[in-house]
């Protein structure tokens, strides 16, 4: 199995606090039958500016340590990129790159309000040949409050990654219900741990995948297929059912 989203590299962002913790996280992932895990430290201008070349350097070290300890798992390079007006330029310059140097780019937005120009940022990335994967849409307040907004990202050609912790409910009922809604509508191409530690936000996919199977078997069945296509840098084609916008009772009394 492949986990496309983790903060497993030590002392780079808000993830693993030490190499020892990183290695323990790798053990947990391997125990859960994960064979490859993509390290995706934040690239957020002004906060965490971990360039792709730095990711490669740290990954070489952690893979070497894992090999010495007999942990049969491979860490692959990536980043979780905060979308802003500079993202396309950073991608063009190679400061940020796709997962395992593929065309698939893991991106995130502000957690509270939908940024005004975020769809333009996605469009500009696509012009560079990138395919954005929106990380944990179920956790964004604007999606929780108005799930139909996710349709706009889908129309722009985004793929979607949902967190295992969201499915299990560790972020609360609202996030969990939003995750289930997105999965039900097929708005989920990847399940990933977004692991930060050995605690609640730890590596592992199997328990959440079993829950996904009960919600939407098509999403469950596509998981391994999509992961393999990503690793081969091949096209992932999919269709999703748009979420209809809920109307309040007052909308019936509004003048047309």
Image (tube, rainbow, N blue to C red):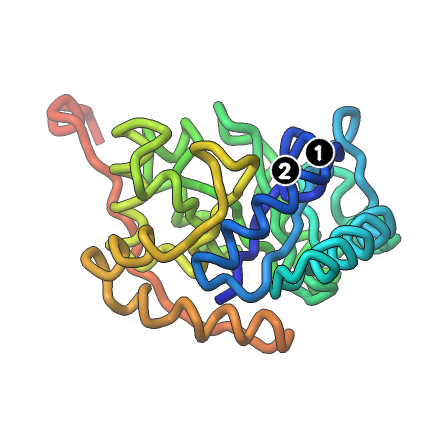
Q: Tell me, for residue 241, which label it has, or none.
A: none
Q: Are marks 2 and 1 in contact (CB under 8 Å)?
A: yes
Residue 51 lies, in percent from the top left, at 83, 44
Q: Is residue 159 left or right of residue 79?
A: left
- Quick one: 221 or 81, which is closer to the camera? 221
- Quick one: 138 or 126, which is closer to the camera? 138
Q: Secondary structure at mark 2?
A: helix
Residue sitting at x 74%, y 44%: 87
Residue 39 lies, in percent from the top left, at 66, 50
Q: Is residue 51 above or below residue 185?
A: above
- Quick one: 51 or 2, which is closer to the camera? 2
Q: Tell me, for residue 18, which label it has, or none.
A: 1
Q: Secondary structure at mark 1?
A: loop
Residue sitting at x 79%, y 25%: 46
Q: Is residue 114 left or right of residue 206?
A: right
Residue, far front: 69
Residue 56 lies, in percent from the top left, at 82, 54
Residue 237 lies, in percent from the top left, at 46, 73
Which residue has dot 2 on it?
Answer: 21
Is any part of residue 89 visible from this angle? no
């Amino acid at each position: 199995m492949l986990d496309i989203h983790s903060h497993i590299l030590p002392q780079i962002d808000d993830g693993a606090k030490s190499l020892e913790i990183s290695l323990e996280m790798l053990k947990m992932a391997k125990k859960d039958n994960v064979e490859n895990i993509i390290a995706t430290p934040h690239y957020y201008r002004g906060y965490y500016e971990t360039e792709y070349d730095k990711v490669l350097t740290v990954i070489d070290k952690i893979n070497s340590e894992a090999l010495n300890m007999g942990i049969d798992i491979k860490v692959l390079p990536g980043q979780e990129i905060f979308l802003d007006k500079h993202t396309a330029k950073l991608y063009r310059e190679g400061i940020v790159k796709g997962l395992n140097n593929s065309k698939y780019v893991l991106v995130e937005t502000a957690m509270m309000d939908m940024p005004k120009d975020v769809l333009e940022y996605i469009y500009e990335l696509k012009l560079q040949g990138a395919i954005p994967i929106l990380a944990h849409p179920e956790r964004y307040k604007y999606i929780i409050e108005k799930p139909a907004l996710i349709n706009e990202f889908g129309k722009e050609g985004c793929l979607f990654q949902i967190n295992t912790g969201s499915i299990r409910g560790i972020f609360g009922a609202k996030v969990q219900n939003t995750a289930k809604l997105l999965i039900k509508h097929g708005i989920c191409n990847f399940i990933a741990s977004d692991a930060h530690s050995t605690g609640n936000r730890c590596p592992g996919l199997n328990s959440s995948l079993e829950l996904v199977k009960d919600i939407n078997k098509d999403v469950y069945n596509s998981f391994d297929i999509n992961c393999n296509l990503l690793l081969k840098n091949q096209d992932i084609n999919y269709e999703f059912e748009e979420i209809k916008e809920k109307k309040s009772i007052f909308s019936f009394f509004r003048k047309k």
